[in-house]
């Protein structure tokens, strides 16, 4: 299995409900996002996929979050816009764009700070 990963970033604000502490107050992050896709074989050019394609998918997904108050977005109504839920949202968004037999999203990692990250691997991956 071959895996290709791109790293992108976005800035956004959120407040996390019912967890206690400072994070319940409005605050923001410069999130770093890593998106990985995989294929069992390389394409005719010898690539898993052109990095530009993954970057485009990532930019589309992150563009829906960038410089916004995440709590106001429909995707996070009724749930905290936590790093975990952000990773799930991005995974699902990119997965829809990558829906082919040969390419699948394997993981999305969201870094909230230099020392804190979450990885979502989908429901059928370990």
Image (tube, helix red, strand yellow):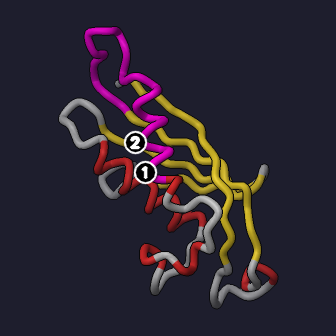
- The vertical placement of 108 against 64, above or below, is above
- Image height of 3 relative to 75, above or below: above
Q: Is residue 59 left or right of residue 32?
A: left
Sequence-first disc among 1 and 2: 2
Tell me the tag on residue 106. Answer: 2
Label tally: 2
Q: Is residue 126 above or below residue 68?
A: above
Res. 67 image quadrant:
bottom right
Which residue is at a point 49% across and 75% down the rendered structure image? 73
Q: Along the horizontal axis of the image, is 22 left or right of 102? A: right
Image coords of residue 108 (percent x, y):
49, 48
Identify the residue at image location x=48%, y=44%.
58
Does the magenta run of residues contain 47?
yes
Q: Secondary structure at mark 2?
A: strand
Which residue corresponds to the image point at 48% horizontal and 55% vertical from the top-left?
Answer: 120
Query: Distance of mark 1 from mark 2, alpha carbons?
Result: 6 Å
* Marking on residue 13: none
Spot occupied by residue 14 in the image (x, y as percentages of width and height):
66, 75
Residue 86 sits inside the magenta stretch: no
Image point 78% across, 49% down: which residue? 114
Would you say 13 lies left or right of 102 here?
A: right
**Residue indicated by mark 1:** 121
- The span picked out in magenta is 38-61
């Amino acid at each position: 299995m071959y895996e290709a990963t791109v790293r992108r970033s976005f800035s956004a604000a959120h407040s996390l409900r019912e967890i206690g502490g400072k994070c319940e107050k409005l605050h923001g992050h410069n999130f770093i996002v890593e998106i990985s896709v995989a294929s069992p074989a390389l394409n005719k050019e010898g690539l898993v996929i052109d990095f530009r394609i993954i970057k485009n998918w990532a930019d589309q997904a992150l563009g829906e979050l960038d410089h916004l108050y995440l709590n106001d977005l429909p995707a996070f109504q009724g749930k905290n816009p936590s790093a975990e839920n952000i990773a799930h949202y991005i995974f699902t968004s990119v997965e829809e764009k990558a829906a082919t037999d040969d390419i699948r999203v394997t993981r999305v990692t969201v870094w909230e700070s230099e020392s804190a990250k979450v990885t979502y691997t989908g429901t059928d991956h370990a």
